[in-house]
Image (cartoon, rainbow, N blue to C red):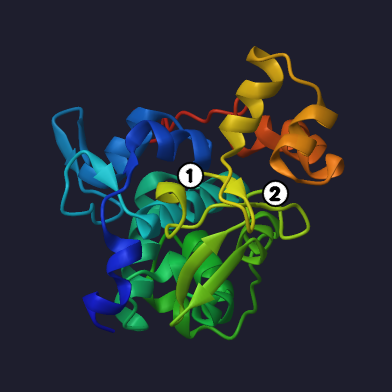
C-alpha cells in the first residue's frame, strides 16, 4: 500500500497531549510508547513507530496507541508483552499497522490475545486453542471506520453518537459528524459563554438533542476522569 494513499492518515497532526487526552493515557506514556525509555539502565524499545515529526503523531499512531492501551487495560499485560505481540503480528501477517487494520485485526485478534497470554511467544500463533478479543477491544474496533483496510475515522463514543475523529476534517479533532463543528467549540459556548442548548442549536442549525449529546459525552471523549499512567517495568 503506497504512502500516497495513506499520506492523509500518516502525516503528523496530533500533539502528544492531544493523543493522551483522546486515548486515556498520560503524555509521558505516549512519548515512551513512541520513542522508548530507559529504566534501571536498560533501554526499552518503542512500541509503535513515530511519525516523521518527532513532536507530533499521525492518525494511525493515535489509533494504534488507543488500541494498545485497550489491550493493556483489558488483559492487564505489561508493555513488553504488548510490544512483542505487536511485532509478531506485524511480521507474521505482513501488516505495517496491525493495531489499525480492518478485518485482519478481528481475524487475528484471538491469536493476539493468545500471544499476550503466552508472553508474546511466536509459537502461540500455531496452537489450536481458541481465544477471542476482549470486549473492550471489540468495542474499540466497532468505533472505527476503515478505508483501504486501515482506520480512516473514529467514533469515540460509538457510531450512534454523532461525534467523529476524522483526519480529513478540522485537523482530526473531535467534531460533530457532517458539520465539522468541534466538540470543544460547543463546550466553550455552553460552559464559558453560558449559552443554553436551544440557542446553540438554533445558531448552528442543529437539533437540540445533538448539542445535548455533545455536552454529555465530551468528558468521556477526552478521558478527563480516566487518565492511565503506564507503570510497567518501573
Mark 1 or mark 2, which has the lower sequence index? Answer: 2
Q: Are marks 1 and 2 in contact (CB under 8 Å)?
A: no
Residue located beneath label 2 in the image: 157
Answer few, some or many: residues within 10 Å of disc 2's Cα (few below 14, many 20 plus, some between 14 and 19). Answer: some
Side (left or right) of 4 relative to 113: left
Side (left or right) of 224 relative to 208: left
Of residues 2 and 138, which is closer to you in this image?
2
Of residues 125 and 93, which is closer to you in this image?
93
Q: Position of residue 168 (x, y in %)?
A: 43, 60
Q: Position of residue 103 (x, y in %)?
A: 55, 81
In the picture shown, does residue 98 fall above or below 166?
A: below
Q: Position of residue 129 (x, y in %)?
A: 62, 80
Write down the quadrant of residue 194 in the picture. top right
- Residue 233 in sight here: no
Of residues 28 and 44, which is closer to you in this image?
28
Of residues 84 and 186, which is closer to you in this image?
186
In the picture shown, does residue 1 fall above or below 121?
A: below
Side (left or right) of 165 relative to 27: right
- Residue 16 in sight here: yes
Using the numbered discs, state the Cα–Cα distance from disc 1 to disc 2 in whole angstroms: 14 Å
Image disc number at residue 173: 1
In the picture shown, does residue 90 fall above or below 134?
A: below
Name the quadrant of the C terminus.
top left
Amino acid at each position: 500500500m503506497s504512502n500516497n494513499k495513506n499520506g492523509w492518515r500518516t502525516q503528523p497532526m496530533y500533539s502528544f497531549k492531544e493523543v493522551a487526552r483522546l486515548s486515556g493515557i498520560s503524555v509521558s506514556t505516549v512519548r515512551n510508547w513512541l520513542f522508548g525509555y530507559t529504566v534501571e539502565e536498560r533501554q526499552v524499545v518503542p512500541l509503535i513507530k513515530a511519525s516523521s515529526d518527532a513532536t507530533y503523531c499521525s492518525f494511525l499512531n493515535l489509533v494504534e496507541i488507543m488500541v494498545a492501551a485497550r489491550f493493556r487495560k483489558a488483559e492487564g499485560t505489561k508493555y513488553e508483552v504488548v510490544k512483542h505481540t505487536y511485532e509478531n503480528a506485524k511480521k507474521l501477517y505482513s501488516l505495517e499497522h496491525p493495531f489499525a487494520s480492518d478485518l485482519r485485526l478481528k481475524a487475528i485478534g484471538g491469536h493476539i490475545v493468545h500471544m499476550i497470554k503466552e508472553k508474546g511467544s511466536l509459537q502461540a500463533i500455531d496452537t489450536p486453542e481458541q481465544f477471542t478479543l476482549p470486549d473492550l477491544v471489540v468495542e474499540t474496533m466497532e468505533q472505527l471506520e476503515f478505508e483501504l483496510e486501515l482506520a480512516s475515522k473514529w467514533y469515540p463514543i460509538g457510531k450512534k453518537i454523532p461525534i467523529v475523529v476524522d483526519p480529513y476534517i478540522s485537523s482530526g479533532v473531535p467534531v460533530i459528524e457532517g458539520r465539522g463543528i468541534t466538540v470543544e467549540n460547543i463546550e466553550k459556548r455552553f460552559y464559558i459563554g453560558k449559552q443554553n442548548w436551544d440557542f446553540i442549536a438554533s445558531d448552528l442549525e442543529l437539533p437540540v438533542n445533538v448539542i445535548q449529546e455533545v455536552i454529555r459525552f465530551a468528558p468521556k471523549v477526552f478521558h478527563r476522569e480516566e487518565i492511565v499512567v503506564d507503570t510497567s517495568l518501573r
